[in-house]
Amino acid sequence: MRNAEVIVVGGGPAGSAAAQRLKAAGADVLVLDKEHFPRHKLCAGWITPQVVSDLRLEIQAYPYGFLNFRRIHWHMLGLNMPLPCVQHSIRRFEFDAWLLQHSGADFVQHAVKEIRPDGDGYVIDEAYRCRYLIGAAGTACPVRRSLFGHVLQRNRDLQTVTLELEFPHDWQDPDCHLWFFEHGLPGYAWYVPKASGWLNVGVGAMAARMKRRGANIREHWDHLMSKLDRQFGIRTPSEPSGYSYYLLGGMDTLRAGNAFLSGDSAGLATRDLCEGIGPAIRSGQRAAEAIVSGTAYTLDGIAGASLGGGLISKSMDWAFARGASPVHY
Ligand SMILES: Cc1cc2nc3c(=O)[nH]c(=O)nc-3n(C[C@H](O)[C@H](O)[C@H](O)COP(=O)(O)OP(=O)(O)OC[C@H]3O[C@@H](n4cnc5c(N)ncnc54)[C@H](O)[C@@H]3O)c2cc1C
């Protein structure tokens, strides 16, 4: 049996951010992930200045591709609004491996199956024991299933469904494009270029609304493919893949004893743009701080909204007020 003071299940942004804070405070921390890093992660890889700031990321020191968008094109209700912005893109394949390595935590590749309480700690698969446990393994996190399943029901109205593909592409347009609510999509489609000649395209929507309309995400993917071909001359080289995650709901039980949930395991993505990297990082850091300093684990500052003030916010508010938000559309 291997012992560690803290075990983090999942080495994505939530797990790495937690591990980094714990290591910095001198804790004995072990990260378990079912994958070997670098690993593929379905995600458009759009990150905000808040993420850069929360991670204290020095962009010049980041060794992989990091793209700054000059503009984001908001396509909505037949309008194209090219808005100047400070936003970024990374490839999750690179970013996550880098974050995990920089956490300085010990890492073991292990797919966690069963967790049981043991005194004031936990035993994992009869092979690992810890006093504190952080669940950071995404939507199907085994910490959630084993220790929170009876108290935390998923709210199906906050479930997203996605299809996306990332591929090498010599893109000509370096701006980010988002198309909202086209063809009745209760969500949006995206074109997110990456540095070093990669491109990520995809569609994301609210699963329950989609189902109620008798629509499916594949039709919307096909629609996006036609648009990309017409508008940019892009033909994707292979089929897309999908992943489902949850937006921030009204939950208040993300700690049970010495076990914590963070990131997608808790369902924290923003309700306007379904942004999950920032909430994952912040919640991982909060869980670590709760362990290190004995403070309460709260989600203060994890607001559930990506849009602040300014023109983008106003234009979205205008559309949302007419019933167009991904959650309410
Ligand atoms: C198509 C798509 C596009 C997106 N685009 C964006 C975007 O542009 N910007 C943004 O902010 N958010 C985006 N998101 C959301 C974002 O990807 C997630 O919210 C974010 O990755 C959550 O981080 P996490 O650390 O909680 O989980 P993850 O990044 O999913 O990491 C979980 C880790 O746990 C591991 N794991 C899983 N099960 C086990 C197990 N049983 N045992 C051990 N390890 C396990 C996995 O291998 C993985 O490494 C997107 C999501 C999707 C699906």
Image: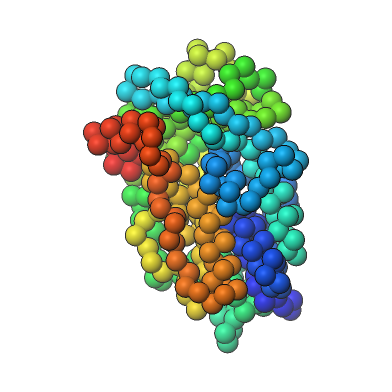
Which of these two is toward me, 263 or 140?
Answer: 263
Q: Is residue 139 left or right of residue 215?
A: right
Residue 298 in which image quadrant: bottom left
Tell me what residue is drawn at x 43 percent, y 61 percent: 300
Q: Is residue 98 left or right of residue 327?
A: right
Q: Is residue 157 above or below residue 296?
A: above
Determine if residue 39 is in view. Answer: no
Which of these two is toward me, 236 or 136?
Answer: 136
Label total for image: 0
Q: Is residue 293 left or right of residue 182?
A: right
Where residue 216 appears, as percent x and y from the top left, is: 40, 34
Quadrant containing the C terminus is top left
Quadrant containing the N terminus is bottom right
Where residue 93 appears, as percent x and y from the top left, is: 68, 42
Determine if residue 174 is in view. Answer: yes
Tell me what residue is drawn at x 76 percent, y 41 percent: 63
Residue 211 in which image quadrant: top left
Q: Residue furthest left?
A: 322
Where residue 227 appears, as percent x and y from the top left, is: 47, 18
Where residue 217 appears, as percent x and y from the top left, is: 43, 34
What coloring was used for the rendering? rainbow
Residue 326 in which image quadrant: top left
Q: Is residue 275 left or right of residue 43?
A: left
Q: Is residue 226 above or below residue 179?
A: above
Q: Residue furthest bottom?
A: 119
Which of these two is toward me, 137 or 287?
Answer: 287
Q: Is residue 23 above or below residue 264?
A: below
Tell me what residue is drawn at x 49 percent, y 26 percent: 84
